[in-house]
Structures are given as structure tokens and as C-alpha cells.
Image: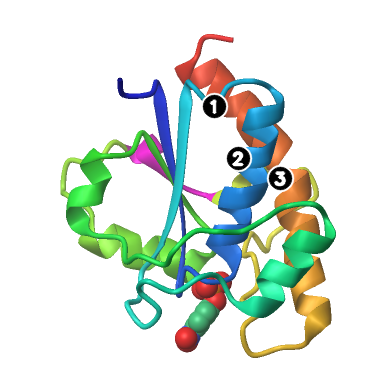
Amino acid sequence: MSKIAEISFVCLGNICRSPLAQGVFQDLVNREKLDQKIFISSAGTGNWHIGNLPDERMRQTAQSKGIKLESRAQQFQSKDFNKFSLILAMDQSNLIRLSEIAPNALPPDKLMLFRSFDPESNDDQDVPDPYYGGAKGFEEVYSMVKRTCPPLLDYIKSRFLNL
Ligand code: 4NP
């Protein structure tokens, strides 16, 4: 049976930011016993890491918070716009790339920036790419993702689940 809301988190490589968002959001959805209603996935706009587990540093950061990341990287395809109710880009460049491959008739609220739900975001709504940086970057990404998931779930509950 298909679920009521199908959510995809999208970054560039699908080995750091979007797998973390997938794992943290899945954990929250499981805790609220909504996993039968919400399907959660992630993808990258790039194809370099297809089939790979998340980056070891991202997995370690998540593991230290009790979250196991087990997704395998995949590339977001144009046809995937039909498969999901809501696609969340992790930064502005991911949003632009997704817009470029989106069907013309894409409803405007189908593709959004993840951090538009961040209660602490200001002008900058990017989740910074931690791939070429140090350990601090992975912790920073975790903090952003962790605080953004609850308001995102509230939005999904009200928009798709009538809760
Ligand atoms: P992500 O990070 O988009 O958060 O998965 C990256 C991972 C790999 C690369 C870039 C960003 N890369 O260029 O291989």
C-alpha cells in the first residue's frame, strides 16, 4: 500500500547531508508512530557516489547521536518528481539543479528548501556542504538537521495527514 506522504531529501552527492536528514527524520517519524504513513528517501543531483553508503564521517556523527545511516546513494531523476509529494533541497544550488530537471507543471509547493523550516535560519538557508571540511562541519550539519526536522514534521502532518 502506498503511503500518504512521500518525502525525498536531496543534496549533491547523497552521501552526507541528505542521508543524515533521511535518518534523523525517519527516527522522528518512527518515534511518533507515523512510519506507516510517511515514506522517506534521499537522493543526490550528482551521480558520483551511486550505490555507496553515506560518508564514513557522516555515519560516525549520526551514530554518536544514536542514528544509523544505511541508505545507498542514488541520483534524483526527472521522473522522481511524480513519485514524491514533497522534495526538500538541502541547499540553494541543489534547488536550482532540481528546478532545471523538473517538469514544467510542477506545483510550486512540491519543491522546497529544507532549511525554510529551520526556526534559527536567517538569510542563509543552505545546509553547508561538509564534504571537503573538518569534523566540525559534520556536527554543524547535524545540529541544523536535528532542529529543522520537528517543524518539518509538523508541516507534513498538517499538509498531508490532516493532523
Ligand atoms: P553531500 O556532500 O552533497 O552532502 O552528499 C557531497 C558529497 C560528495 C561530493 C560533494 C558533496 N563530491 O563532490 O563528491
- Above or below, comparing residue 16 to residue 120 in the picture: below
Quadrant in which the N terminus is drawn: top left
Q: Which residue is mark 3?
A: 148
Which segment is the magenta one? 108-113
Count of marks overlaid on the render: 3
User: Residue 4 magenta-drawn?
Assistant: no
Q: Crowding near pointer 1: few (<14 within 10 Å), some, many (20+)?
A: some
Nearest to N terminus: mark 1 or mark 2: 2
State which tag comes first along the sequence, 3 or 2. Answer: 2
Indicate the amino acid at tag 1. Answer: Asp
Disc 1 and disc 2 in contact, CB within 8 angstroms: yes
- Structure colour scheme: rainbow
Q: Which residue in the structure is indicated by mark 2?
A: 26
Residue 34 locus on image (x, y percent): 58, 21
Cβ atoms at labels 3 and 1 below 8 Å apart? no
- Quarter holding the C terminus is top right
Q: Position of residue 71 (x, y in %)?
A: 49, 59
Could you give the CA–CA distance between mark 1 and mark 2, rounded to whole angstroms? 8 Å
**Which label is found at residue 35?**
1
- Pick whichever, 126 or 163, lies toward us: 163
Amino acid found under the numbered disc labelled 2: Gln
